[in-house]
Image: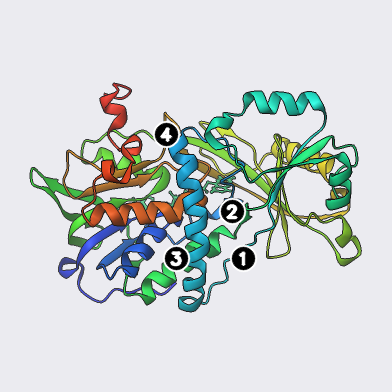
Amino acid sequence: MKKIITDRPDKIYAETIIVGGGVVGCAIAYELASRGQDVLLLERSAIAGGTSCAAAGMLAADSEDFAHPLIAKLARQSRQLLIEQQVLMATLSEVETGLQHQGFLTPFRSYSELSSYKDNRKSALSASADEVWWDRSVVQQEASWLNRDTYGAYYRPYESEILPVHLTKAYAESAQVLGARVMEDIQDIRVQANEHGVQGITTSIGEMKCKHVIIAAGLQSEELMRHVNLSLPVWSVKGEIAAVQFSDEHAGYRPDRTVYAEDIYIVPKANGEVWLGATSLPGRTDLNVSVQGVQKLLTAATHWVPGMKEAQFIRAWAGVRPATPDGLPYIGACKSIPGLFAAFGHYRNGILLSAITGRLIAELLAGKSSEELGIEALSPERLNRKGVVQ
Ligand SMILES: Cc1cc2nc3c(=O)[nH]c(=O)nc-3n(C[C@H](O)[C@H](O)[C@H](O)COP(=O)(O)OP(=O)(O)OC[C@H]3O[C@@H](n4cnc5c(N)ncnc54)[C@H](O)[C@@H]3O)c2cc1C
């Protein structure tokens, strides 16, 4: 990643400073830079070094069961926007994002499993007119690698997936080509604000002045907000994920589209690997991978794709999802501190929602209100108003 440090820190000025170089911060940098804005992104370690490097990269806008109808709507918009952005980013950056559009299958073992799925799914929120029911015979014909006892499956043809680290780097590099500045290894960032609003930030290498600060630091955003006396809780939900690969000899067993089952997802990636995810461990922040976690993933994966037994185990890793108490991300202006914006708490859909988050933040900076954008439900201070946090 190109690092640009042109001035002495105390001389650095940017109209907008973004804190955090995960997929969300980089998507915002890209959107602002593409509008000709003066933007500086600061990352304490390396671009895509946080949760974004752990994700499976599914853009599951039709398959996820979202916490709010607004998120279901934004998810579909974001998937579309992201697909469009790829075309331009391919001309700006040399990073291949591995975007694939093979659709997702949600399979069921039995009629009763299907019924309880339908009952449990907040389907009014996210059911897609674009899903097609495949009965057993269609499944056997269209997905010969899937367990032959499968009762049936929903096929969602518009679902896509991407390589998350590559996407994050493509955003960052494209933003730089469009004029954004990106600085890595910047420690001890604190927002400076007074009664008039944001003044800038302090860092281990000095002060930087700006008009707007956008906090997009994933899990660590809560701490950054606490420095300016804002309480925006972020909860940790650890997830473990594994990668396998099929040799040429066993290529016929390799799924050719994503399996999005109740107990596992199986994602054939553009880099040749197949990713199996993920466990869900609330409250855990360590990045250890347990035998139990991997065992659970492999058991579910070999049930749905019996030929998985022939695959080669490549590696396993863990990441920590940034969740919020009501399941919605914080996207918007912090009303009590003019110039300060939040863009974090995307839980298990930050890759999917990155593009629309960038667009919404850019619209807010351009002067639109969250009411005009229809995103009051994502307002950063909503939980204080409801008395959820003091
Ligand atoms: C196992 C797993 C599977 C997942 N699968 C999917 C999926 O298929 N699809 C999907 O859409 N989402 C998925 N997710 C969720 C997704 O990964 C997250 O929602 C997303 O990565 C959050 O991005 P972010 O930019 O907010 O946070 P991060 O990627 O964590 O980025 C925040 C950045 O801020 C930096 N930072 C922190 N503090 C500071 C500071 N003080 N100063 C400067 N920089 C700072 C960090 O170093 C980091 O680089 C998955 C997550 C996990 C764990």
Which label's residue is closer to the chain start, 4 or 2? Answer: 2
Say which residue label 4 marks.
324
Please provide percent x and percent y for residue 14.
21, 65
Q: Is mark 3 on a helix, strand or loop?
A: helix
Extreme residue in the top direction = 387
Q: Residues within 10 Å of mark 4 (few under 14, many from 20)?
A: many
Q: Is mark 2 on a helix, strand or loop?
A: loop
Q: Are marks 1 and 3 in contact (CB under 8 Å)?
A: no
Say which residue label 1 marks.
98
Say which residue label 2 marks.
57
User: What residue is drawn where x is 17% and y is 38%?
Assistant: 336
Given the image, on which type of amino acid does mark 3 rest?
Answer: Tyr
Q: Using the numbered discs, state the Cα–Cα distance from disc 3 to disc 4 in whole angstroms.
A: 25 Å
Q: Is mark 4 within 8 Å of ligand 1?
A: no
Given the image, on which type of amino acid does mark 1 rest?
Answer: Gly
Please provide percent x and percent y for residue 257.
74, 54
Q: Do the residues labelled 1 and 2 touch (CB within 8 Å)?
A: yes
- Image quadrant where residue 388 sits: top left
Which label's residue is closer to the chain start, 3 or 4? Answer: 3
Q: Is residue 35 above or below residue 373?
A: below
Which label's residue is closer to the chain start, 1 or 3? Answer: 1
Q: Using the numbered discs, state the Cα–Cα distance from disc 1 to disc 2 in whole angstroms.
A: 10 Å
